Amino acid sequence: MVTLGVVSLLFLGSTVRLFVLPRRDDPASVDAIVMFAGSPGRFEHAVSLARAGYAPTLAVSVPTAEDPCPPPIPNVEVICFAPDPLTTQGESRWTADAAARYGWRSIIVVTSTTQVTRARLRLERCYPGQILMSPVPPPRLMWPYMIAYEWAAMVKALVLQRDC
C-alpha cells in the first residue's frame, strides 16, 4: 500500500512538472517565432508576439488547408509551412531546416502548456540555437486528454524516436 502511494505521488509530481507547470521562458528578441499546430489560442498568441516586435519572422505550422495562415503583419515576414510528418517531430525538423536556411540562431516556440517539455526535447535534438518556449494553456476540458496524450507521446519520443 505504501509503495502504491509513493508511485502515485511520483506519477502525479512528474505529471505536474512535465505537463502542467513545465519550464517556460519570458519572451525576448529572437530571430523567429515558430508556432506549432494544435490547441486553440496558439495562433492568436503567436501573432501577438510578432506584432509586439519580438522577431522579424513568424513561422506558422498549417498542417491542413483549413488551418489559417496569418494575414500580413507590418515588418514581419510570415511563413506558413506544412510539416512532414504532421507531428511535433516533423515541426522540429522543419524548424531546424528553416533555421539553417534563414540563419536563425534564436527562436520563440508557441505551443500548448502540455506540449512544452516534449517540444523542447524534440527541438533540442534538431536545432542548436536558443529556444524560448511561450506556451498557451489548453481549454480546461482538454487538459485530461492532452496530459494522457503527452505521456504516451513522451514515451514514444524517449524510447522509439530518439533522433531528430
Image (cartoon, rainbow, N blue to C red):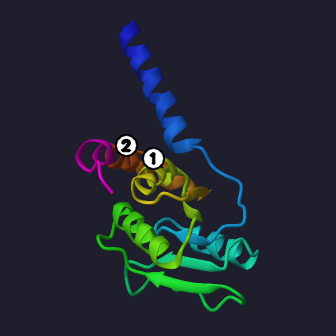
Q: Which residue is mark 2?
A: 151
Left or right of residue 57, residue 162 in this image: left
Of 142 and 101, nearer the camera is 101
The magenta stretch is: 155-164
User: Is residue 65 inside the magenta stretch?
Assistant: no
Residue 98 visible in the current orientation: yes
Q: Image height check: is 61 above or below 26?
A: below
Q: Which residue type carries mark 2?
A: Trp
**Which residue is rendered at x = 54% and y = 36% of the image?**
17
Q: Using the image as rendered, state which of residue 78 and residue 63 is in the foreground.
A: 78
The part of the image, by quadrant, that contains residue 51 is bottom right
**Rendered location of residue 61, percent (x, y):** 46, 75
Q: Main secondary structure of the magenta part?
A: helix
Looking at the rendered structure, the secondary structure element under dot 2 is: helix
Q: Residue at x 48, y 36 (%)?
A: 15
> Distance between the Cα atoms at labels 1 and 2?
11 Å
Please tell me in which quadrant of the rendered image residue 151 appears. top left
Q: Residue furthest right?
A: 52
Query: Which residue bears the numbered disc 1?
Result: 144
Above or below, 37 against 5 in this view is: below
Q: Amino acid at mark 1?
A: Pro
